[in-house]
Every structure is written in C-alpha cells, then in structure tokens.
C-alpha cells in the first residue's frame, strides 16, 4: 500500500480540500486510523486466524515466571499458544513444548499458565527455574498510521534523537513515537519522550534508530498500512465519507461508512488465506473403488 501522504493527497484532491481552509492533516490522519481500525475489527471478527494478524515473540526465562503480554497484542484473549523451552533442547520446533492454560484455582498445584493484569504467569517453581525461554504466539493489532513528522538527523545512544527539522504536529498528538524506513514500514517502536517542542527528543529508546529513518507519532506506528493493497480503496472511501458528513451531525449519525457489499468484499479478502489445505485430497482413485 502507498504511504499515507499519497493517500491524503488523493483524498484532498477528490474532496476539494487542497487550500489552506481545508481539513487539517492531523484530522485526516485520524480518519485513516478510524478506517483501519474498522477494517481490522471487521476482519478479526470474521477470521482472527488471518495471516495478517499472526505474530510470535520470545522471552528469556526469569526467576519469577511472570512475562508481559506483547504491547501489540490485539487483546488479552488473543493469545493463541504459549510454549516453553526447558534445558538445552534445540530439537524439533527449536525445543519448544506447549504449556497448558489453567485456571487460578489450579495455579497452586498444576503446571501451566494463566493471564492476569496483562501478564502471563507460569506456575510451578521448579518448572519456572528450568524454563530457558518462553514463546508466545498471538494475534496482533496493526500499527497506527501517521505522516512523516521529521527525518532523523543524529542519535546519542540512550539519550536523545535529533531531527533534521522541528515537527509541526508531533508534540500535540502524544508523548511517544516510532521510526519508519523509506518505504514507510516501522523500524523502531515505543520511543517515549518528555519534550514538548524543538527538534530533539529526549529518550532512552535509541537502539536501532539511525539517520536513514523518519519519525512518526505513536508508540506503535508506521507510515503505510499493513493492510493489503486491495484494501486501499476502502480506506479512501471511508475517509471521504467522514469528510462529507463532518459538519452535519444528523448525516453522520445515519451514515454507513461501508456498504454491505463492501463489507462482504473486505471479509472475502481474508476469508481463507491459509497456506495449506484443511485436508489432504485423495489422489489414489483405486482407494475409492468398492
């Protein structure tokens, strides 16, 4: 999909919002994020196993047996699988074996995991001490969208990120940023800063940031949507409808931003995108004879 700046230009051209009295860029960015969330929810509701949402991350073992749920997890009930690696096993599946979900009442006497307060708790002290690493497979939420705020100029490790220019909207949109590459894909996320102006961000999150990247607003943000190219037209249609009903509350309340046909089309894009067949077809015709 194209970078957000190109989509905004297309929307401005098609809705007569090109002059200085047009709708502000941050407002249009908000409409695009609403459109993406709507499509994301529509897809997830109908097919949470779509490849688009699959994500996996690993954690080193620790003495507490407590691990944070990944920040980009769609919701606390969106964890598909938790596995542990014990000892030095690196065999099949990199030595990982499934850990069973258990209830709170079982936690004191049965090995397994439970989720509480956005954390994963592994039971059994002896098992926890032998746990080398934990692997969580989950369904992620897509990064939010933003325009390029400024290009990175220089970095002081664990101290600051200096931008080539002072961003116009960064400080009014939140206190966290991400960086993206030339294509608009996310490189570094979770850059929290304390500044309210200027071209330098005071932050300890500098690992992986360099002067080939751009700053975008949002702790988990990018410059082009991770939705497939076929969804671009739906994003544009949604934003246009938001603009058309912007100043008319009654119309906005009644407006259906996607028609039923468009919803069906979006769902069909992700209705079955598994890489393997559900069952192996029978090719031995002799087997079918009685």
Image (cartoon, grey):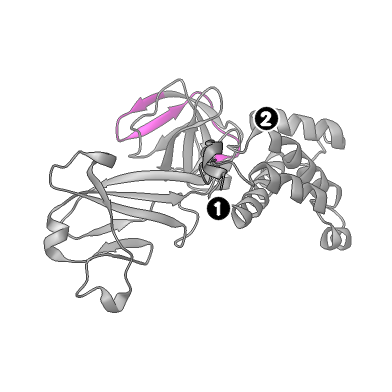
Residue 205 in picture, x, y percent from top left: 35, 38
Is-magenta flag for residue 155?
Answer: yes
Magenta stretch? 154-170
Residue at the bottom extreme? 105
Residue underneath mark 1: 48
Q: Within the image, what quadrant is residue 27 found in? A: top right
Query: Crowding at label 2, few (<14), some or many (≥20) Cα neighbours within 10 Å?
Result: some
Name the residue: 67% across, 52% down.
38
Residue underneath mark 2: 5
Residue 257 in picture, x, y percent from top left: 79, 52
The answer to whether residue 121 is left or right of residue 231 is: left
Query: Crowding at label 1, few (<14), some or many (≥20) Cα neighbours within 10 Å?
Result: some
Residue 119 in picture, x, y percent from top left: 34, 61
The answer to whether residue 57 is left or right of residue 259 is: left
Residue 20 in picture, x, y percent from top left: 80, 34
Name the residue: 33% across, 39% down.
204
Question: Relative to 125, is 221 above or below?
Answer: above
Local secondary structure at mark 1 = loop
Residue 25 visible to the viewer: yes
Is-magenta flag for residue 134?
Answer: no
Local secondary structure at mark 2 = helix
The answer to whether residue 123 is left or right of residue 282 is: left
Q: How far apart are marks 2 and 1 (CA)?
A: 29 Å
């Amino acid at each position: 999909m194209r970078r957000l700046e190109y989509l905004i230009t297309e929307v401005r051209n098609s809705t007569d919002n090109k002059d200085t009295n047009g709708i502000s860029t941050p407002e249009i960015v908000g409409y695009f994020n609403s459109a993406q969330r709507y499509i994301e929810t529509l897809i997830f509701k109908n097919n949470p196993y779509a490849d688009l949402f699959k994500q996996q991350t690993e954690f080193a073992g620790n003495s507490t047996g407590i691990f944070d749920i990944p920040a980009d997890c769609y919701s606390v009930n969106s964890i598909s699988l938790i596995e542990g690696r014990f000892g030095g096993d690196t065999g099949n599946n990199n030595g990982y074996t499934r850990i069973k979900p258990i209830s709170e009442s079982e936690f004191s006497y049965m090995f397994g995991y439970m989720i509480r307060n956005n954390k994963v708790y592994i039971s059994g002290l002896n098992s926890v001490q032998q746990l080398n690493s934990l692997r969580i497979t989950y369904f992620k939420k897509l990064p939010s969208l933003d325009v390029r705020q400024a290009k990175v100029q220089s970095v002081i490790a664990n101290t600051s990120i200096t931008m080539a220019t002072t961003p116009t909207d960064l400080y009014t949109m939140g206190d966290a940023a991400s960086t993206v590459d030339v294509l608009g894909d996310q490189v570094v996320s979770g850059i929290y800063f304390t500044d309210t102006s200027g071209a330098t961000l005071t932050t300890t999150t500098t690992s992986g940031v360099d002067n080939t990247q751009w700053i975008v607003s949002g702790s988990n943000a990018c410059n082009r949507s991770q939705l497939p190219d076929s969804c671009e037209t739906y994003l544009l249609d949604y934003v246009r409808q938001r603009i058309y009903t912007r100043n008319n509350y009654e119309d906005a309340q009644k407006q259906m931003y996607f028609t039923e046909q468009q919803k069906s089309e979006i769902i069909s894009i992700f209705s079955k995108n598994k890489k393997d067949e559900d069952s192996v077809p029978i090719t031995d015709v002799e087997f079918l004879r009685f």
